[in-house]
Amino acid sequence: MFKFAPLGKVMNRTLDREVKLAVTGLRRSGKTVFITSLVHQLLHGLNSTHLPFFEVVNSGHLRGSKIMPQPNLHIPAFPYHHAIAQLCHEYPNWPQATDGLSEIQLAIRYQSQGLLAKSLSSSSTLYLDIIDYPGEWLLDLPLLNWTYEQWSAHITQLCQTEPRYSLSEEWRNYLSTLAVNEGDIDPLQRDQFIRQGSQLYTAFLHCCKEDKYGLSLLQPGRFTMPGELKDTTLLEFYPTLSLPAAPIKVNSIYAEMKKRYDSYKEQVVQKFYRQHFASFDRQIVLVDVLKALNTSYASYEDMREAINLVLHSFQYGKSGFLNKLFGLKIDGLLFATTKADHVTPNQLPNLERFLQTMLAKSYNNVSFEGVKTTTLALASIKSTQSAYTTFQGQRFSCIKGVPLDGDKPVALFPGEVPYEGLLPEGWIDGRFNFISFKPPRLSDSHSSGLPHIRMDRALEFLLGDKF
């Protein structure tokens, strides 16, 4: 049965006074750092000279921002203050990766524009809601469109190529010993077979997740980042590598795993989607392109497929009055490649073009729906400085920063980003070596925004038309 939203929230949505922002990204794409920087830039916008392309700040119309009390008491607060404390420590660290659900709401007050707005009030307030969650959980959204048989066929196909073929060997060998459609089996023994197979499948997913393989499409996402579902029977199932002959026996391993898969979709994935993904207004998709370039062609292809599958789960379209009243579709989508400070400034156009080529399918689908879309290379918190070096009489651009595994600044040329996609043979060993850096030492984070690259452009795209 359809439920109407509270009148206050309906009016806020209808009058463009509330924006729900979807910060979407796979594991290690930089969601937590992006949210921390976004909140900090807004809280310090009045005193900031770091946001020249964010018009409400540049025009002097911003009146201030503040963090609001937790809107949903059953959801933990986004750990903004803890993240800032880590960044501002004498020995700064990057904020910890997200391992659960959290939320933050900002109130942004600005000078009213237009005759009607000014006649009602000299100032207006925009409420910005942001949800943070592990990137692994996003990978479950495509399951909503797949039956157990379709999902099993998808995983089977993935496991036919390297590196998954080798990494899944122990799990596949175990499955070959099971009679999955045997109905005359003790339920306790059946559950033990399922539990053991689930443990082997989960271990296989964790191997795929290792940095040297860098695979992204790891389903179900809760198997490697379970959150509150850790050690529950709801996470004890796995795909089958071949469909058993009909009819399916009622008490068989196959029937039980199919039942658990359907329960997982209904109780975990569908619930998560309805509560947190069904009513977003704007979206930013964060992609760590450099990670894919560093790893392998298989990592690049896997990341591309994972992101395109996830984006297919969202609802896109122009937002009119009725959509605002009864549930919005996303009407603005920003594709952002993160860690733009890990390449030289002249490589930013290449970084943006590479991402646009990588996600061409989703970019085309969203643009077809009339959604405002763009691509941007950004660094939520800038950890390097531009520098120059001379080699054999020629001057080269480079970057300077403290490596994540070091304690002294180094200047280096990180390499060139391909302008468009690469063929498999383009991944030559040693061609790409984009290293990670420690956060910068901050002299005073309480008087101005954090150092960044193009966060002001991201803010203008996502929020600029709301002021």
Image (cartoon, grey):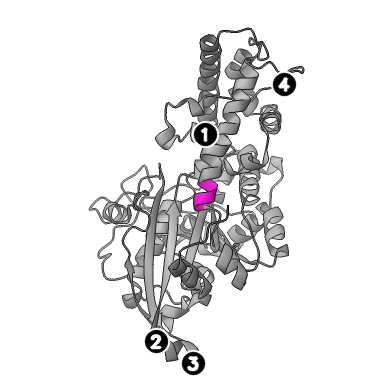
Q: Picture coordinates of residue 420 (x, y %)?
A: 68, 55
The residue labelled by disc 1 is: 209
The first of marks 2 and 3 along the sequence is: 3
Q: Secondary structure at mark 4?
A: loop
The amino acid at mark 4 is Ser
The residue labelled by disc 2 is: 121
Mark number for residue 115?
A: 3
**Residue 317 as seen in the image, left or right of residue 430:** right
Q: How far is disc 1 from disc 2 in space, using C-alphas?
A: 53 Å
Marks 1/4 in contact by CB < 8 Å: the verdict is no
3 or 1: mark nearer the eye: 3
Q: Secondary structure at mark 2?
A: loop
| Label 3, residues with CA under 10 Å away: few <14, some 14-19, many ≥20 | few
The first of marks 4 and 2 along the sequence is: 2
Q: Looking at the picture, tell me which residue is in the foreground, 126 or 350.
A: 126
As for residue 274 lying within the magenta part, the answer is yes
The first of marks 3 and 1 along the sequence is: 3
Q: How far is disc 2 from disc 3 in space, using C-alphas?
A: 10 Å
The amino acid at mark 2 is Ser
The residue labelled by disc 4 is: 242
Segment colored magenta? 272-276
